[in-house]
Amino acid sequence: MTRIAIDPSDWLGHARLVREVYGRLTAEGILIAAADESGRLNPMTIGWAVFGRIWGRPMFPVLVRPSRYTYRCIEHTGDFTVNVMPPELADVVGACGKTSGRSLDKIAAHGLKVLPSRHIGSGGLAEANIVLECRVVHRNDVQPPSFAPDIIASYYPEGDFHRVYFGHVLGVSVREGFLQDDSA
Ligand SMILES: Cc1cc2nc3c(=O)[nH]c(=O)nc-3n(C[C@H](O)[C@H](O)[C@H](O)COP(=O)(O)O)c2cc1C
């Protein structure tokens, strides 16, 4: 399937892209993907992210718990892709949030195809409507003493405090035809 490249410094100006990223993120989730030490790409579902501009760059920070195989993958690669899947693949997105790449090749299990990246080592997913290629330019662990107590109690009863990976968006591509209703 043909893909159209978008200038990363402009991508937040495309209402259609922003709406779709936020819409899918808050529905079934979106997939981040990074390769493991053997080069195998591992997709993981996320439901939380912030995106915007930091340090004069387009940025996409994501939160990953140390218990995830993805944590190990990103520590290894220093990069990741953000993949916004079509709603028809919502069940695949859900499944990638329930199984771990430690014990399952999720790409093979769900019949997904790897899309080679242009700017980073980790690939994207060919089925995605939107793929962002991100290089980690900063990482930071959330700090327990800095939290409001209700957040600690709700989200960290067992510790496993997120590491925030600040991804600099170096590449953006969309499925051909996806931007046609950008004016909406
Ligand atoms: C909708 C949804 C959103 C999720 N969001 C996150 C997230 O933002 N950060 C995180 O560390 N895990 C999140 N998870 C959990 C991981 O996707 C899940 O633990 C996954 O199996 C980890 O895969 P891995 O071990 O291959 O990395 C989410 C799961 C779902 C279903």
Image (spheres, rainbow, N blue to C red):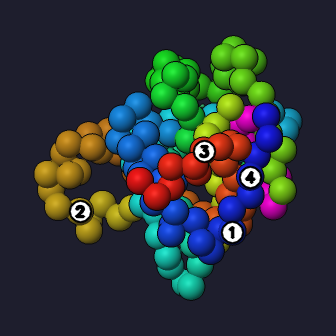
Crowding at label 3, few (<14), some or many (≥20) Cα neighbours within 10 Å? some
Q: Which residues are magenta?
A: 119-126
Percent x, y for residue 169?
64, 65
Q: Quadrant of residue 120?
A: bottom right
Nearer-N-terminus badge (3/4): 4
Q: CA distance from mark 4 to mark 1?
A: 10 Å
Mark 3 vs 4: CB contact within 8 A: yes
Q: Residue at x 52, y 22 (%)?
A: 88
Disc 3: which residue: 178
Q: Is residue 147 left or right of residue 141?
A: left
Q: CA distance from mark 3 to mark 4?
A: 9 Å
Q: Amino acid at mark 4?
A: Ile
Disc 1: which residue: 7
Nearer-N-terminus badge (4/2): 4
Label 1 lies in ligand 1 vicinity (Cβ under 8 Å) = no
- Between 88 and 62, the residue placed more toward the observer is 88
- Between 103 and 90, the residue placed more toward the observer is 90
Q: Is residue 150 above or below residue 8?
A: above
Q: CA distance from mark 1 to mark 3?
A: 15 Å
Percent x, y for residue 136?
65, 64
Disc 4: which residue: 4
Disc 2: which residue: 147
Nearer-N-terminus badge (2/1): 1
Q: Is residue 155 above or below residue 100?
A: below
Question: Residue 44, can we see it?
Answer: no
Determine the secondary structure under disc 4.
strand
Mark 4 vs 1: CB contact within 8 A: no
Closer to the eye: label 2 or 1: 1
